[in-house]
Structure formats: C-alpha cells, structure tokens
Image (cartoon, rainbow, N blue to C red):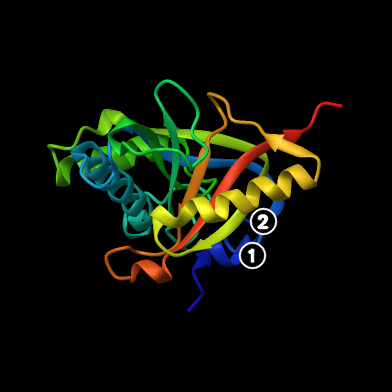
C-alpha cells in the first residue's frame, strides 16, 4: 500500500523550523480560506470557520471514494490548520494585545495543486448535503504568496509566543532586515498540535513574520 503524501514531511523547511529564528522564502501555496473577527476562544464565527475548513478539506481528500476522481488526484494527509492575524485598525506583530475580541483573522488549510475551482465547488456541494446549515459562501479557494519571512518553532502556550517573537525581531535586525507587515503580509501561525489533546507546555506552533531588507 502506497504511503500517503504528507506535506509536513515533504516540505520540512516549511513545517519543521528550528526553535531559533531562521529565514525562509515561502513560495505560492493554495489554501481554502475563511475570514472572520473575534476572540478565537469564544467566537462562534471561529468555530464555524474551522468546521468549514475541515469539512471541505476532508471532502476533497475523500473524493478518492467517488466515481469522479479529480484529475491529478493523489492520496495525502490533510495539512495543518494555519492562521493569519491582525487588528482592524493596524497590523499585529504577535506581542501587544490585551483584548482578543479585536482580532481579525483568516483561517486556512493548505490544498494540493489538483484542487481547482471545480474541485472546490464539488466539495462545497457535497458538504452542503451533509451540513445544510453551514454558510459555505464564506469559504474561498485562493493562493497566498508569503515570500521572504522569518520563522520559529514555538513550543508552549499560545500566550507565551511573545518570547519567541522577540527573539525573531532581534534576529532579523541583526541580519539586516525589518518587519514588513501590510494588508497582504500578516502575523502567521501554523498549528502542529491539537490543543484539545496536548498539554499547553507541549504545544508546537510555527510563527512566521514577513520581512524586508532594511533601507540603506
């Protein structure tokens, strides 16, 4: 039996960074995305976004069981949940926030390259049959090109991320770079652990920030 393609294993530079900051140039990647606002710990919109993302991602993965297999299909492990984070009135560097209800976010899951708009729409139709109450119009298929970034593997509670982010900031300035947050480039987290099953001190989260060379 052929082993399932695992994006985390095949792209170790993207999914297995060190616990010290490193530079990376992230290529264009295809995602299913859902936008929203609010505290992820309490927001119904956030819970709904995850239901949409996982429902659509697994519908596409399980299309191998259908009669109409997508062109180029291969069996794979569904990639981890990711999130882009910012505040409505400004960018967010992952450090200074006390009111999480002010968060704006894009939650997303990577998709294989064979996932076209047609494949995506088919998955939406299947999920609509299973869960007719879900607002499938909130989900979109898009390509995100992150580009030059700094990243780190943060191990521990989400609220302790500022310690890792400060080390990222010190690193990029020593290397001749600066933060490059914008409407398109945001604080990025990749969740490698399930917080429902993993103690907070063992959570693994990739933190990635956009950077640019300092102007001389």
The dot on residue 21 is: 2
Which element type, helix, strand or loop, lies under badge 1? loop
Residue 180 placement, left or right of 137: right
Measure how far apart labels 2 and 1 are at the Cα level: 7 Å
Crowd class of label 1 (few under 14; some 14 to 19; many from 20; radius 10 Å): few
Residue 184 placement, left or right of 131: right
Q: Nearer the viewer, residue 56 or 81?
A: 81
Quarter of the rendering occupied by the C terminus: top right
Q: Which residue is labeled 1 in the image?
A: 18
C-beta proximity under 8 Å, tags 2 and 1: yes
Q: Looking at the picture, does residue 206 appear above or below residue 45?
A: below
Q: Position of residue 125 (x, y in %)?
A: 25, 38
The quadrant in which residue 136 appears is top left
Tell me if I can see residue 189 in this picture: yes
Q: Nearer the viewer, residue 179 or 188?
A: 179
Which element type, helix, strand or loop, lies under badge 2? loop
């Amino acid at each position: 039996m052929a082993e399932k393609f695992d994006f985390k294993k095949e792209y170790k530079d993207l999914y297995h960074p060190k616990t010290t900051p490193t530079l990376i140039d992230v290529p264009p990647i295809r995602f299913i995305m859902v936008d929203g606002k609010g505290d992820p710990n309490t927001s119904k919109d956030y819970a709904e976004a995850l239901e949409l993302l996982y429902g659509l991602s697994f519908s596409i993965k399980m299309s191998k069981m259908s009669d109409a297999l997508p062109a180029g299909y291969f069996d794979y492990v569904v990639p981890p949940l990711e999130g882009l984070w910012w505040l409505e009135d400004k960018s967010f560097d992952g450090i200074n926030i006390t009111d999480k209800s002010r968060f704006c976010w894009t939650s997303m899951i990577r998709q294989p390259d064979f996932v076209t708009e047609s494949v995506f729409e088919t998955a939406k139709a299947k999920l609509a049959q299973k869960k007719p109450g879900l607002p499938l119009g909130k989900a979109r298929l898009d390509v995100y090109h992150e580009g030059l970034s700094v990243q780190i593997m943060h191990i521990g509670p989400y609220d302790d991320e500022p310690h890792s982010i400060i080390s990222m900031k010190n690193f990029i300035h020593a290397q001749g770079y600066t933060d490059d947050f914008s409407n398109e480039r945001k604080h990025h987290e990749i969740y490698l652990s399930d917080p429902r099953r993993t103690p907070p001190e063992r959570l693994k989260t990739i933190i990635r920030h956009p950077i640019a060379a300092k102007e001389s």
